[in-house]
Image (cartoon, grey):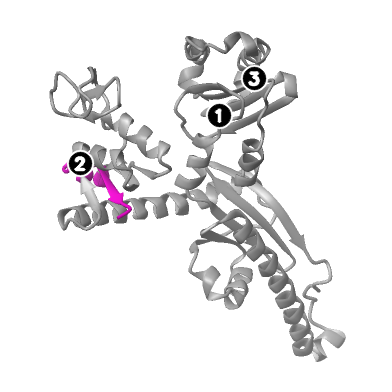
Amino acid sequence: MFERKDLEELEKLHFDDAFVVSLFLNVSPQERKKQAYLSKFKNLLKNKTDYNACKEDIDKIESFLQGERESFKKSVVVYSCVKKDLWVRYDLNAALNDDLVIDKTPYTSPLFDLLDNYQKYGVLLVDKKTARVFLVFLGDIEEYGIVHHEDVPGKHKKGGWFALAEKRYERHIDYHVKMHLKDVLDKFDIFLKDKDIRRLIIAGPDEAISELMGLLPDEIKSKIIGRVNLEKYASKDEVFEKVLPFIEEYEKLKEKETVSELIIKALKNENAVIGVDDVLKYLRDKRVMKLVISKDHKVGGFICQNCGFATTQSVECCMECGGCVMKSEDLIERATEMALAQSALVEVVKDEKDRGKLLEYGGVGAFLRF
């Protein structure tokens, strides 16, 4: 899993006397059948004028793709520069457009786009002595740390001195538990800000969660999308399995809100548009803040080979520059490429009901910057 600071460090690299190969490749199980992804890799190399200058990197990447296939997820990203001892690999459970760039510096825009377009979820698994912190992002879960306070006393069986001083001892336990939870919250707040996490799930035994909720500041409470009962020793996979339904339900709800808001605003002409041609127009003007598209939806049309102008209208030459046009089966893909190039957000509507609602208005829309 990568962070913004990792990409910023990569962006600082610039070699005057060497090239960096940046590869983005779909290696999903379907692509791994008969090693189809290797053919795609070789096709990406065609017409690369700097191929010979980085042949060592190409050979290394090809060997990696052949030998590591069993460890792949959905996509793989590789940055390689043998001359400068650079090798960075990211395995993702998210789809990426296939691309290969040879340049003096790593090509990081697609990964920055992922950071900007996908929600991060923090998970705090807490009991009265221990707390574990997880980050869920792009279909993966990573454990980031643990807070443990051994000096929190445990409950004793009644009898003897404890029977006489039970209430005082319970107050003693409560005090230490509260100190533990306050320390956890201090550390967790730093984690949330450092990772820019805006959605949370609280997990643990019900009693511990109830005590924690009483201490949470409103700022953190407002980010909580779910609570789940879990033992503190739950494995990373068990945690992911338990929190995933909350994440899916939340994202489904946000999709519904996005589609409804988009259509209402577009019909009122309030900084939003719907329909392929209008979206493409505002993309050309660089006014799109967020592109919203229906999953797997395609719209045919024409794209200018000279300036990139695109339209659903049947034209013989470009309406902008007069250049030659080429027929395209997927203008939605063109719109997505333009949006990402402008650092606009892109949301793909997957829920069938909301997807169908958006399809009634052309299957694509956009919120505008101004």
Q: Residue furthest front?
A: 321
Q: Amino acid at mark 1?
A: Lys
What residue is disc 1 on? 73
Bin the neighbour count of mark 2 within 10 Å (Cα to Cα): few under 14, some 14-19, many 20 and up.
some
Query: What span is colored magenta in the figure?
Result: 353-370
Q: Is residue 204 visible?
A: yes
Query: Which quarter of the figure has residue 88?
Result: top right
Crowdedness near tag 1: few (<14), some (14–19) or many (≥20) residues, C-alpha within 10 Å: some
- The circle drawn on residue 68 is 3
Looking at the image, is mark 2 or mark 3 nearer the viewer?
A: 2
Give the mark nearest the N terminus, 3 or 1: 3
Q: Which mark is residue 261?
A: none
In the picture provided, is 267 more to the left or to the right than 350?
left
Q: Earlier in the sequence, mark 1 or mark 2?
A: 1
List x then y, in percent, for residue 36.
48, 13
Distance in Å between CA atoms under marks 1 and 2: 36 Å
The residue sitting at 51% across, 12% down in the picture is: 48
- Residues 135 and 288: in front is 288
Q: Which residue is the site of mark 2?
A: 278
Seen in the picture, residue 281 relative to 157 is either above or below; the reply is above
Sequence-first disc among 2 and 3: 3
Q: Amino acid at mark 3?
A: Glu
Judged from the image, the secondary structure of the residue bearing numbered disc 3 is: loop
Give the SS element for disc 1: loop
